[in-house]
Structures are given as structure tokens and as C-alpha cells.
Image: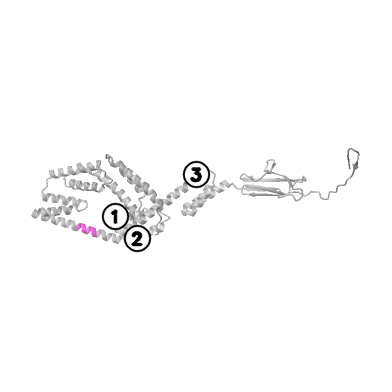
């Protein structure tokens, strides 16, 4: 009953047909280390939800909760707008969970992925390992795995470069049938320490084995030709001794000059000098002049762009000093020039191989060449210029390796 200020009264009956006595329903969902809580009430609706973890106090649920690793007991209270609370004894209101240490699992998975990549050296496995490592939190463990992947990629690249070099070296030897090219290819295949190109290495070795009889045959022919040349020179010297004919002496000298440097060549030259009655004093003057000319050219000329001229002067000085009974006084100066020639010849060969045959000198070969260049005796400018030239070529090789593709075996 209600009454207004004028005293009027009225009575109205209110009939309540349905009272919300239904308890809310809750659902606790834990996935990995994330917990979400869903609560529902079909009548008055949910007013608020609380949860507690282990022995902590209840706190209001506002959204997804991140759980720490380990075993936990989680309890939930859901209250509807009628004041009803979910059944606290229900299995849905309380759950026991064991949260795995995700960071530990991620690290284990990433480590296994890296180990697999190191074993297979497969590009897909490497990429999968990179993805797993990238998701790890920053720290020493992540850095260590990244370093292992970097080392792996360097190893794979080194194997690739070594295989390409060996392949092209064998290809060149097959074309030239040259002993020096064959020996270079043999060493390149032998030094190919690989698991990726194991079958390809075996195939290259089979090619070398098949080439060997042809190389030996050509080498034997060359040796026979050399022996024939020596016999011819000996015959000319005998004729010169008997006849003292200047033309015969000159012909013998020309033939000796064409021989490769050797003890036999030195001995033949001395026999001819004796026959020609050339005095040691005259020979000493010739040797002095030839070595001084070689020294001057080595110290003051642009030998990088005039290697042939340097080699020509060296041969003349070598010939002159070899004709002396005692040439020890010129040894260090001749060795100095020879060192420069050897370094420049190696650099020239590496450049030609790269340009004509796609045979790229290895990092080890370039390091050894730089070391030899650094050990050269000082000259006015040539030593530093040669080292600079080698370093420039080394950078060019790096660019070439990036663009060189693996040939089919």
C-alpha cells in the first residue's frame, strides 16, 4: 500500500513469477601458459568473476592471465546479478594444472633444430632452425645458437666454394692435359673436405684417375723431348771441341738457352764456356752487370705491369751467374727477385684462372700469398703496390663467390 500527501491510499499486489536461483556456470581453459575464464548465467547474467592461484587471495578476472611455470591449483568464483555464486565444490570451479616452462621448451626445440641443421646441412632445415632461434628471448643462449648457425653457413659456403674450384680445376686439366694443371686439380679434389658434395668429389676423382694415363703419356713425351735436346747439345759441344767452329758454338748456346733451369743446363753451359775459352773474369763482369740491371729494374720500375720484362732480366742474370765457378755473392739478390716473380706469377695465375676457367683461389691460398708478399724484401714501391693489388683481387674474389653457382657433376 502507498499513500500520497493528500491522504489518498492505494494498494497493488505484485506477483513474482520467476526468481533467479540458478547458479552461474564457469569454464577454466588453460593453453600453454595462458588461462582464460568463461562464466555464463541464463537468467540475470554475470556480475563479476574472481579467481585465485594456489594460496593467493581471490582477484577480479579482467582477461587472459599468464601463468608461471609449474604446478598450480586454480579456483574460480562467478557471481550473477542475483547474487548467486557458482558451486565451489564443482570440478569446473577448481582445476589443477601443470604449466610447462615454455621458454625452456622453446630453447630445447631451437637447439634440436640447430643440431639437425648441422647434421643435414639442408637449406630448409637451416631456415627452420633460424625461425625457431629468432623467437627466443635475447640472451646468451640465443646468441650461441645464432653463432652456431653462422658458423654452419660459413662452412657450407666454404664447401661450396671448394667444390666449384675443384670442379673447374678438373675441367681445365681435362682440356689441357697439362701436368701442372692436373696436379693443381688433384690437390683441389684432395683438399675438398665435404659431406655435402661427397658423391661429386668421388666423381671428380674418377675423372682424374681416367686422365692420369694421358697426363703420364704427355709427360713422358716431354721428358723424351728434353732428353733429345740434351743429346743434341752434347753432340754440338763435342763438334765444337773438335772443330772450334763459331757457328756450332752459337748453335749450342741457343739450344742451351731454351732448356729449363736445371743442374744439367748449368753443367752443359760450363762445358760450352770451357770449349769457347770464356774467362771467369769476363763472366764475372757479365754477371755483375746483369744482376745490377735486375736490381735497378726491381727497385725502380713498375714491375706489376711489366712482369715479362722482369722475368727476362732475371733469366739473363741467372744465366750469367750460373756460368761462374762461385756465384754465392749474388744469391741473396737473385732470391729477392725470384721471390717477387713467384708472388706475381701466383697472382697472375689466380687472376687468369678466375677469368678464364672460373677457378677461384681459396681463402687459404690468398692468405698464403699475402703472407709471402709481406715477407718480400723491401723495394722503393713495388712491395706495397703488390700487396695492394693482392688485397684488391681478394675483394673481387669475394664478390665472384657470391654470384658463382654450383655446377652439375
Asked if residue 223 is among those painted magenta in the image, a careful observer would answer yes
Q: What residue is disc 1 on?
A: 180
Give the mark, 2 or 1, whose residue is nearer the N terminus. Answer: 1
Asked if residue 36 is among those painted magenta in the image, a careful observer would answer no
Instruction: Measure the alpha-carbon separation of dots 2 and 3.
Output: 44 Å
Question: Is disc 3 surrounded by few (<14), some (14 to 19) or many (20+) residues within 10 Å?
Answer: some
Of the pair 332 and 303, the residue shown nearer to us: 303
Residue occupying the point 36% across, 56% down: 167
Residue 285 locus on image (x, y percent)? 15, 43
Whether label 1 touches label 3, CB < 8 Å = no
Residue 246 locus on image (x, y percent)? 10, 53
> Is disc 1 placed on a helix, strand or loop?
helix
Give the mark, 2 or 3, whose residue is nearer the N terminus. Answer: 3
Residue 326 locus on image (x, y percent)? 17, 44
Instruction: Measure the alpha-carbon separation of dots 2 and 1.
Output: 16 Å
Can residue 326 be seen by looking at this rendering?
Answer: no
Q: What residue is disc 2 on?
A: 207
Amino acid at each position: 500500500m502507498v499513500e500520497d500527501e493528500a491522504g489518498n491510499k492505494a494498494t497493488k499486489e505484485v506477483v513474482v513469477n520467476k526468481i533467479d536461483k540458478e547458479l552461474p556456470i564457469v569454464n577454466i581453459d588453460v593453453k600453454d601458459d595462458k588461462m582464460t575464464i568463461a562464466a555464463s548465467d541464463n537468467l540475470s547474467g554475470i556480475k563479476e568473476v574472481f579467481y585465485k592461484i594456489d594460496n593467493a587471495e581471490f582477484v577480479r578476472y579482467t582477461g587472459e592471465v599468464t601463468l608461471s611455470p609449474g604446478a598450480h591449483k586454480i579456483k574460480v568464483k562467478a557471481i550473477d546479478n542475483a547474487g548467486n555464486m557458482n558451486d565451489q565444490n564443482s570440478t569446473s570451479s577448481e582445476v589443477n594444472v601443470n604449466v610447462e616452462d615454455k621458454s625452456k621448451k622453446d630453447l630445447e626445440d631451437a637447439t634440436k633444430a640447430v643440431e639437425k641443421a648441422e647434421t643435414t646441412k639442408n637449406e630448409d632445415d637451416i631456415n627452420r632452425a633460424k625461425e625457431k632461434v629468432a623467437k627466443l628471448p635475447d640472451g646468451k643462449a640465443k646468441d650461441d645458437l645464432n653463432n652456431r648457425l653462422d658458423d654452419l653457413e660459413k662452412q657450407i659456403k666454404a664447401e661450396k666454394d671448394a667444390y666449384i674450384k675443384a670442379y673447374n680445376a678438373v675441367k681445365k686439366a681435362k682440356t689441357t692435359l697439362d701436368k701442372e694443371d692436373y696436379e693443381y686439380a688433384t690437390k683441389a679434389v684432395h683438399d675438398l673436405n665435404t659431406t655435402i658434395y661427397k658423391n661429386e668429389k668421388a666423381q671428380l676423382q674418377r675423372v682424374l684417375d681416367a686422365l692420369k694415363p694421358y697426363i703420364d703419356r704427355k709427360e713422358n713425351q716431354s721428358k723424351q723431348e728434353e732428353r733429345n735436346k740434351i743429346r743434341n747439345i752434347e753432340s754440338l759441344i763435342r763438334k765444337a771441341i773438335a772443330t772450334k767452329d763459331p757457328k756450332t758454338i752459337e748453335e749450342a748456346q741457343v739450344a742451351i738457352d731454351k732448356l729449363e733451369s736445371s743442374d744439367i743446363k748449368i753443367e752443359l753451359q760450363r762445358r760450352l764456356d770451357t770449349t769457347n775459352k770464356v774467362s771467369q773474369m769476363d763472366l764475372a763482369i757479365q754477371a755483375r752487370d746483369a744482376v745490377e740491371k735486375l736490381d735497378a729494374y726491381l727497385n725502380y720500375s713498375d714491375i706489376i705491369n711489366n712482369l715479362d720484362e722482369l722475368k727476362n732480366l732475371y733469366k739473363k742474370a741467372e744465366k750469367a751467374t750460373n756460368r761462374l765457378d762461385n756465384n754465392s755473392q749474388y744469391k741473396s739478390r737473385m732470391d729477392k727477385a725470384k721471390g717477387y716473380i713467384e708472388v706475381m706469377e701466383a697472382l697472375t695465375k689466380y687472376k687468369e684462372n678466375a677469368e678464364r676457367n672460373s677457378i677461384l683461389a681459396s681463402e687459404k691460398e690468398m692468405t698464403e700469398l699475402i703472407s709471402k708478399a709481406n715477407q718480400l724484401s723491401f723495394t722503393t714501391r713495388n712491395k706495397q703496390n703488390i700487396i695492394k693489388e693482392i688485397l684488391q683481387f681478394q675483394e673481387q674474389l669475394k664478390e665472384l663467390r657470391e654470384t658463382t653457382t654450383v655446377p652439375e657433376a
